[in-house]
Amino acid sequence: MKMGKLVMLVAMFAVVAFVAPLAQADEVTIACGADSWLKYSSWNQEALNTNHGDDTSLTVGYPGGNVIMKFDLASVTGDITSATLNLYATYTRDKLINVYRMTNTDWVENEVLWNFASTDNAWTTPGGDYDNSLLASYTFQQADEWKYTSIDVTALVQAAKAAGQSYASFILLGSEGGVFSSKEGYDAPYLVVDQQVVPEPMTMTLLALGGMSLLARRRSRA
């Protein structure tokens, strides 16, 4: 092998070795894909069978129920470094809200009920199936009303990806009513995910070829 070709080959591997480990910071904002709230009543069958998928507000706890929402993770392809759930509150005075990861993400917004994730798909546990590991919570104060508040849900989104879920689906629980805008309201929930994305192999190859071309031009001028 001629020395020139050997130098070019070494240079190519050097460029690839330099580029490959470099992950790029990327932030994605994900709109809420579906949301609703599920009401329990021991005496009112109508409450159990009423769907709230079109409601403009979501009420956690009494007199509302369990709030559920989900976000498509198709754009989250890298290592998750942080994730925040952003909710617009209209009434939240001294309300502790716990956020859990749902294990059943196949619920249908305009069909979901207290006992059913969709018309022909019952929850394993009425009120929504979720992992009861508490990884996110926030106590809303009066000062949090009429604005967005961010809740750290990094561990929940990481767990969703690790479980192979296509959606990050959350259930919000609380003993008393906290009211938030739904995706049908003026200020919809949204999820912000920061991630580290490694360039695709083709991108690295193109960068390597670019580096080789640059070296070749420099050698031709020498």
Image (spheres, grey):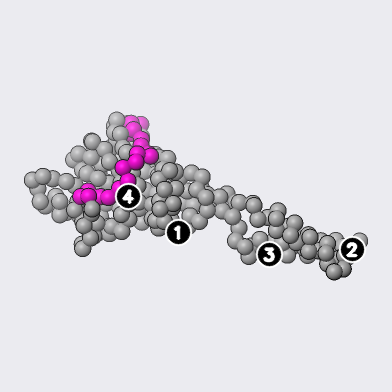
Q: Tell me if mark 1 has few (under 14), some (14-19) or many (20+) residues whose alpha carbon lies within 10 angstroms of its own.
A: few
**Disc nearest the viewer among 3 and 4:** 4
Residue occupying the point 52% across, 53% down:
78
Q: Horizontal placement of 48 versus 81: left or right?
A: left
Task: Assess whether mark 2 and mark 1 are in contact (beta carbons under 8 angstroms).
Answer: no
Relative horizontal placement of residue 129, taking residue 48 as reference (left or right): right
How far is the residue under mark 3 from the one under mark 2? Answer: 23 Å
Is residue 130 part of the magenta span, yes or no?
Answer: yes
Other-residue count near label 3 (Cα within 10 Å), few / some / many at <14 / 14–19 / ≥20: few
| Cβ–Cβ under 8 Å for marks 1 and 3 | no
Chain-order first, disc 1 or disc 3:
1
Where is residue 22 shown, x and y percent of the image? 64, 51
Label 4 – label 2 distance at C-alpha: 62 Å
Quadrant housing the C terminus: bottom right
**Residue, disc 3:** 206
- The residue that mark 2 highlights is 221
* Residue 154 visible here: yes
Assess disc 2: are there few (<14), some (14-19) or many (≥20) residues with their C-alpha within 10 Å of its C-alpha. Answer: few
Q: Specify the amino acid type for callout 4.
A: Met
| Magenta segment | 125-143
Residue drawn at (41%, 56%), measured in percent from left and top?
164
Q: Disc 1 or disc 4, which is closer to the eye?
A: 4
Q: Earlier in the sequence, mark 1 or mark 4?
A: 1
User: Reading the chain from its start, which is encountered first: label 4 or label 2?
Assistant: 4
Distance from Cα at disc 1 to Cα at disc 2: 47 Å
* Mark linked to residue 74: 1
Q: Would you say the residues marked 1 and 4 are in contact, meaning their CB atoms lie under 8 Å apart? A: no
Q: Earlier in the sequence, mark 3 or mark 2?
A: 3
